[in-house]
Every structure is written in C-alpha cells, then in structure tokens.
Amino acid sequence: MTFIGRWKGAILGALAVGAASLLGVLEFIPSPAVTAVYLFGGGLIAGLLTPGTVRDGAVAGAVCGVLVALAVALTTALMSVVASSPQYPPPWATFGFYALVLTILLLPYNAIGGAAGALVRNGILRAGTPAGTIGAAERTRWLGIGVGTAVIAASTLFIGFLGPLIAAVPLIGGFIAGFAAGGEARDGLEAGLVTALFGTGLFSLPLLWTASHAAGFVAGLAGMAAVALGYLFILFGTAGGVAGAVVRRSDTGREDC
C-alpha cells in the first residue's frame, strides 16, 4: 500500500486545515474556529476517513498533526526568505524551531481528534448491528489505555513534587497500556503511543494555558516545559508500552510451560 493510500485520511485532514487557514486569513471564519481546526479538526477528518480501530484513527490524526506542523513551519521559513529581514534567523533555523514547537502542540490534540473521528465512523458503520460486538480483549486494551492516560494526565498536579521522577510517569502509563494490549510488541507500541499522545495532550493543558496567559520568564518557562516534556512523554510512553507487552508475553509463556 502506498503512502498516500495508507494515510489518505491524514493528508485530506491536513488539506482541510490549510483550507480553513486560508478562510481565516480572508476573514470568512473567526480566529477561534481556525485554532480549533488546527488543534482537532484535521485529526477529526483523518479519523473519519481512516478505516480500522480507534487506535488507527488516533495514529492517523497524529500523522495529520505532524503534516500540518511541517507545512506551517515550511511556510514560515519561506516567508522569512521573502521578507529578508535581519530580525529573522536563517531559514533552516526558522523551519526547525517552528517544526519542533508546532509538532508537539498539534500532534497529541489531533490524535485525540482522530480517535473521536474513528469513534464516530465506527459507530455509524455498526449502527443496527447487535450490541456487545466489541470483544473482551478490545475492552481490556482500552481500559489499559484509559488508566495509562489518567496516570500521565494526573501527574501535572504533582509536577512540582516529582521533579526528575516525572520521567517515570509516562513509562508507567505506557507500561499499563502495553500490558493490557496483549503480548505482541506491536500492540504494545501502538497502545503506548496512543496513551502517551492522549496523556500528553491533557498533561500539557495547564502548561499551555500558563504560557498563553502569563508574561515574561514564567510564560517562556511554561512553553519550554510543555515542548520538552511533550517529546519526553511520547518517547517514554511508547517505550513503556512495548515493555508492558513484552512482560505480558513472557508471563504468558511461563504460564503455558
């Protein structure tokens, strides 16, 4: 399957974000609506157009967020070349900065939008079918993702007390999700990634609010913390998911002996 075929929903979602951005520039739609489309709309469309499970929708939404972030970063870098003002850094530095910041902002929230889109799509497709068609394994998988997400999201309340131990939180959350997902490393990777994306999105809300409403050093520190911890959480949460699946597989193997 080609890249376009596999990620058709993500690509169309990114194009929809671009169209909404253009309409916002032309003042056909208000700025808050454009912001909502950037954060969730592209992912929602990606989830609606992506066949498969809710996890597939979440991953498609995340890909959409990355595509939008890269497109905005590239556009900003090209504008800096056209403006050719001394206040702009080199184009490659402009692209790198905006890609780094926007990716960690748009990726988790578009993943949530993608999951919502997949829920709607699957609900429509299952309309009229007998209830209870979701198997016990899938319910257990989503229970693990929900618990792992809650662990990561709740850690924002204790960030001041955890200090360096904050890095252990996504590992624990991802491990719970991966253990519940099954004994295959791929299942653990997907569950850990989705958990990390959902948890990071919720965890970052207070930091992003502070960065938007505070001033000076506090705003800058909150923004940098959101970016740094966002990447750290996604990396560690995914690794924790793989570890959880591997541990479950080894436990299952011992029980079968």
Image: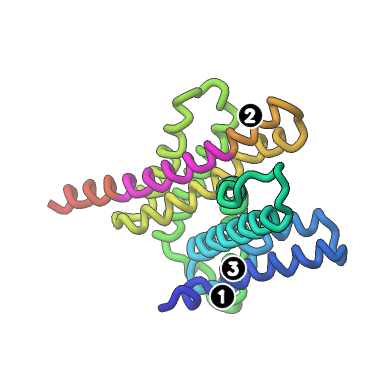
Q: Which of marks 2 and 3 is nearer the N terminus?
A: 3
In the visual, does 18 lie left or right of 156?
right
Secondary structure beneath disc 3? helix
In the visual, does 188 lie left or right of 21?
left
Disc 3 target residue: 46
Amino acid type of the residue tagged 2 in the rendering: Leu
The kind of secondary structure the magenta stretch mainly shows is helix
Q: Considering depth in this image, is 160 or 132 the residue closer to the camera?
A: 160
Residue 31 on the magenta span: no
Q: Mark 2, residues whose alpha carbon is within 10 Å: few (<14), some, or many (≥20)?
A: some
- For the point 51% across and 71% down, the residue is 7
Q: Position of residue 156 (x, y in %)?
A: 58, 32
Disc 2 target residue: 221
Disc 1 target residue: 126
- For the point 49% across and 53% down, the residue is 194
Between the C-alphas of marks 2 and 1, the distance is: 46 Å
- Give the residues drawn in magenta, as a range: 227-245
Q: Mark 1, residues whose alpha carbon is within 10 Å: few (<14), some, or many (≥20)?
A: few
Amino acid type of the residue tagged 1 in the rendering: Arg
118 over 229 or under it: above or below: below
Residue 238 on the magenta span: yes
In the visual, does 243 lie left or right of 154?
left
- For the point 42% across and 49% down, the residue is 192
Amino acid type of the residue tagged 3 in the rendering: Ala
